Amino acid sequence: MHVIRTECVIHAPPAKVWAVLADFASYPAWNPLNLSAVGEAKTGARVAMVFRDLSSGKPGATIRQTVRIVAADAERELAWAGTVPLLFDGRHGFLLTPQDGGTHVLHTERLKGLLPVSWSPARIERDFLPHYEAVNRALAARVAAL
C-alpha cells in the first residue's frame, strides 16, 4: 500500500474550507486533480468524478469513476473511495483541524491493489505528490477568493 500525504495551513476557518471542498459543482473552476464531480458531499452518496490519470504518464489523460463518499463530517472531514476490483483501491481525503485562527488541512490518499503495488516510492513522489500539493495551493487560493 502507498500513502500520499500532504499538508497545508489555510488562513480561514474550517467552515470556509469545508464549503469549498463540499461544493463539487465548482471543482472544474479550481481543482487541478479532480476535474469534475457530480453528486453530494454526504456519507454514502455516489459521486461521478473525472480526475487526472497520474498513473498513465500521458499528459491530459483522465479517468472517469463513480466514487462513494465514505466521510462527510462538515467542517472536519471529507473522503471518498473508489475501486477497480483487484487492480486499484483508493481512499482520497481531507481532514480539517482548526489551527491558529486558520485550518490545517491533511490531504491524503491510500492506494492499494495490483496497479499501485507496481509503483515505486520514487514514482509516487515524482508523478503524484506534486499534483496533490497543487490541489492544496488551489484550495487555499479558492478559499481566499471567496
Image (cartoon, grey):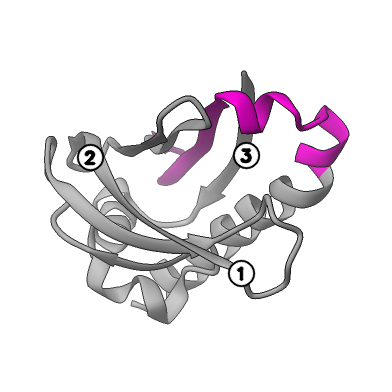
Secondary structure of the residue carrying tag 3 is: strand
In reply to whether residue 115 is colored magenta, the answer given is: yes
Front residue of 46 and 3: 46
Residue at 31 percent of width and 63 percent of height: 20
Relative height, residue 76 to residue 131 (above, below): above
The image quadrant that residue 68 belongs to is: top left
Q: Nearer the viewer, residue 66 or 121?
A: 66
Query: Which residue is disc 1 drawn over?
Result: 61
Answer with left or right where residue 98 lies relative to residue 54: left
Q: Secondary structure at mark 2?
A: strand
- Label 2 sits on residue: 69
- Where is residue 74 shown, x and y percent of the image? 17, 42
Please give the label number shown on residue 24.
none
Q: Is residue 145 visible?
A: no
Taking depth in this image into account, of 78 and 143 the one nearest to the observer is: 78
Tell me how far mark 1 sits from mark 3, CA to CA.
Answer: 23 Å
Question: Of the residues under marks 2 and 1, which one precedes in the sequence?
Answer: 1
Three-letter amino acid code of the residue under disc 1: Ala
Is there any visible trace of residue 9 in the rendered image?
yes
